[in-house]
Amino acid sequence: MARRRPPLWVERDASIHVVFFLLSQLGAAVLSLLANLGRIGLFLGQSVGCLFVPPLKIRRVMRQIQFIGARSLLVIALTGLFAGMVLGLQGYYTLTRFGSEAYLGPAVAISLITELGPVLSALMVTGRAGSAIAAEIGIMRITEQIDALEVMALNPVRYLVVPNIVAGIIALPLLGALFAVIGIYGGYLVGVQLLGVSSGTYFGNMTDFVSMTDIRNGFYKSLVFGLSITFLCCFKGYHTGYGAEGVSHATTEAVVWSSVAILVLDYFLNSVLL
Amino acid sequence: MVVGCHPGAGLFPQLGAAVMAEMPLIQVRELYKRFGRQAVFQGLSLDIMRGEILAVVGRSGTGKSVLLKHLIGLIRPDKGQILVEGQDIHQGGSRHLAQVRERFGMLFQGGALFDSLSVEDNVAFPLQEKTRMSDAEIQAAVAEILKDVGLEGVEGKLPDQLSGGMRKRVALARALVLHPEIVLFDEPTTGLDPILVRSIHRLIADTQAHLHYTAVIVSHEIPQIFDIATRVAMLHQGVILEVDTAARFQCSSNPAVQQFIAGRPEGPLTST
């Protein structure tokens, strides 16, 4: 027996429901995105506002510089050394094809100073210190320590967020510079000591081709990354969900958001600076 | 039959006379609050008198801690007002709210001690931030308040190295160190043994008698809380079901109050 086709109005009604459902889902996603962006904007405004309200918590800033900067030295030195060695190796074999191995020094130096130094050091700091910052502030949120600050009529942003941002702005350019210097030495080890490029050529061409603009661009990038990593990690920690799961989720999101932000900002900064 | 009616049987019966017939220090007016679909307050009103110890009781999840957070402005109501000496705490912006908060101290349920700071630094923190006292004066004030709460010789320890009762005492010391006019206690004795419960209650009553602050205590300690409370308010279904002096509250004819005091599983509280 042939199945009877439902009346046309029933089909039309069902399809209207599907369209409404999809539209409501889209609307909810857009509203959630806008709410998040608004929250980030307000938090950024509050944090930047507090940056200029004296007195700065110097002791806490120094502690955070030690945590973000000094404690990241080993991982920055190691990654810088191997990044430079890889650049030396890859650069040498690529440049040999064009008979330009004499330019190995400037190639390694420019790559490290303008690009790899700021970006990789920022990614390393995100993984090592950014996650810890998000977790620490998240735990303070769920154990009501942030509420305790508010109850004492103190501004938690001034105590928890501003010192991290100031420390990030100070530490990241220094770590980026250290990364580049050690990377250049790694390139020297491979290019000069292992593959036979002369030391004079490696360093001589470097001073000829690397300009102050390259160094300044690398510095600007590190400044922006220092601000964005610390801000995003503090934001995620400050707005953490409930319980251990909430903190774990906030920490993961802080690392993911910061890493993506570094790469996206890197592209836009290159577009503006180059 | 009225269960658990022991008027005047408290440890500190003299506190019953402390309520003054004057304008309330804190007035909660027609408070409404929802979290998503859950309506926590539905027109809650409550007066808190200067110098009294008001105990707020009620079943778990009725919004007692949320009420405390409203009193100190940590949560904004959807509708309604919190008036401190007749002034709405949310009118006048964040600066006014900060000024109001300086009159408050709060003991959080979990203590909310700063876990990276020692006991001494935790208690000294409000003094360092809110006063111009010298380091020596701060050290002396911290030593004195720690002595008052019965904690000596633990100044250098971290909160994680203390027992639950000791943590509550440190939190109490931190809440009282600036001599606030109003102190909010969010379940100050939860998870403690009966001896410690009595001891913390005695500490609250002693410090209140000494410092004359107004106290609002959220508690589940029935009947021990009646020993120190001047008045008791019971929160149920988003409103204050009953508020009266501790003695009269215990003799209330309201079956819901009696069920709560007796801790009976059957009754109007569980049938709704």
Image: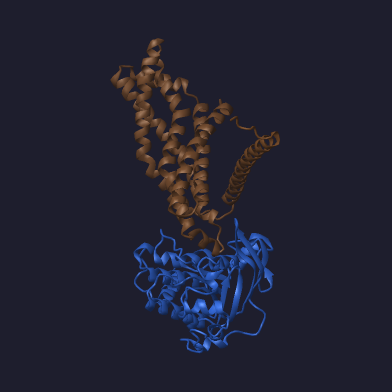
Chain colours: A brown, B blue
Which image quadrant for residue A4? top right
Q: Residue B91: percent from the left, percent from the top? A: 69, 63
Camera-side residue of A172 and A247: A247
Q: In this view, does A201 lie above or below B70?
A: above
Q: In this view, does A269 lie above or below B126?
A: above
Camera-side residue of B148 and A146: A146
Q: Residue B264: percent from the left, percent from the top? A: 47, 76
Q: Is residue A79 above or below residue B149?
A: above
Camera-side residue of B107 and B7: B7
Q: Residue B45: percent from the left, percent from the top? A: 65, 72
Q: Tell me what residue is drawn at x 43 percent, y 70 percent.
A: B190
Q: Which residue lies furthest to the left in this view?
A: A194
Q: Tell me what residue is drawn at x 67 percent, y 80 percent.
A: B23
Quadrant holding the C terminus of chain B = bottom right
User: Image check: A12 left or right of A91?
Assistant: right
Q: Can residue B54 be seen in this view?
A: no
Q: Is residue A112 above or below residue B49?
A: above
Q: Can residue A175 be seen in this view?
A: yes
Instruction: Report the number of discs.
Output: 0
Q: Tell me what residue is drawn at x 60 percent, y 29 percent.
A: A2
Q: Residue A267: percent from the left, percent from the top? A: 54, 29
Q: Residue furthest right?
A: A9
